[in-house]
Image: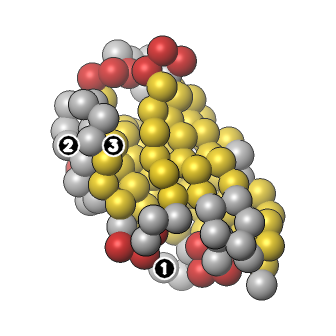
């Protein structure tokens, strides 16, 4: 069974940084495409960044060079380095996975999800 566990969320002031991690178990990690999505209260869950099993990354436009997604297949971990955080980045951040796949920023393409980690950015 695929399991995803996020960590690294917290509260920071605008302009600060956070590094999210997602540790996976239960599958051949390096054959899966992975992504970070987020959901703010009352809003739809949206894609933030994705990375396919070849290491190709894709970012949402609102990222604008502030975030970096990476994966370490040796330790089955996905990362999201977030810099220059803004109050509008406040949301629950979720890790997602799909076998094979691509780096599409489409929620419906992913069939495994973590429980989420909260990110709060104050002004």
**Residue placed at 33% from the left, 43% from the top?**
51
Question: In the image, is 3 to the left or to the right of 54?
Answer: right
Q: Earlier in the sequence, mark 2 or mark 3?
A: 3
In the rendered image, the quadrant that contains the N terminus is: top left
Q: Which is more foreground, mark 1 or mark 3?
A: 3
Disc 2 secondary structure class: loop
In the image, residue 29 above or below residue 101? above
Disc 1 marks which residue?
A: 43
**Residue placed at 68% from the left, 42% from the top?**
7
Disc 2 marks which residue?
A: 102
| CA separation in Å, label 2 and label 1 | 25 Å
Q: Position of residue 107 (x, y in %)?
A: 31, 58
| CA separation in Å, label 2 and label 3 | 8 Å
Q: Position of residue 74 (x, y in %)?
A: 48, 15
Disc 3 secondary structure class: strand
In the image, residue 20 above or below residue 107? above
Q: Position of residue 65 (x, y in %)?
A: 45, 65
Disc 3 marks which residue?
A: 51
């Amino acid at each position: 069974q695929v399991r995803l566990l996020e960590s690294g969320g917290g509260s920071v002031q605008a302009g600060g940084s956070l590094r999210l991690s997602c540790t996976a178990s239960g599958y051949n990690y390096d054959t899966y495409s992975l992504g970070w999505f987020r959901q703010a209260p009352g809003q739809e869950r949206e894609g933030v960044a994705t990375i396919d099993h070849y290491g190709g990354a894709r970012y949402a436009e609102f990222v604008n060079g502030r975030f970096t997604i990476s994966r370490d297949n040796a330790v089955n971990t996905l990362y999201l380095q977030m810099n220059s955080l803004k109050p509008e980045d406040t949301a629950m951040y979720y890790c997602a996975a799909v076998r094979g796949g691509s780096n599409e920023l489409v929620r419906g393409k992913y069939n495994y999800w973590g429980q989420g980690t909260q990110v709060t950015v104050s002004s």
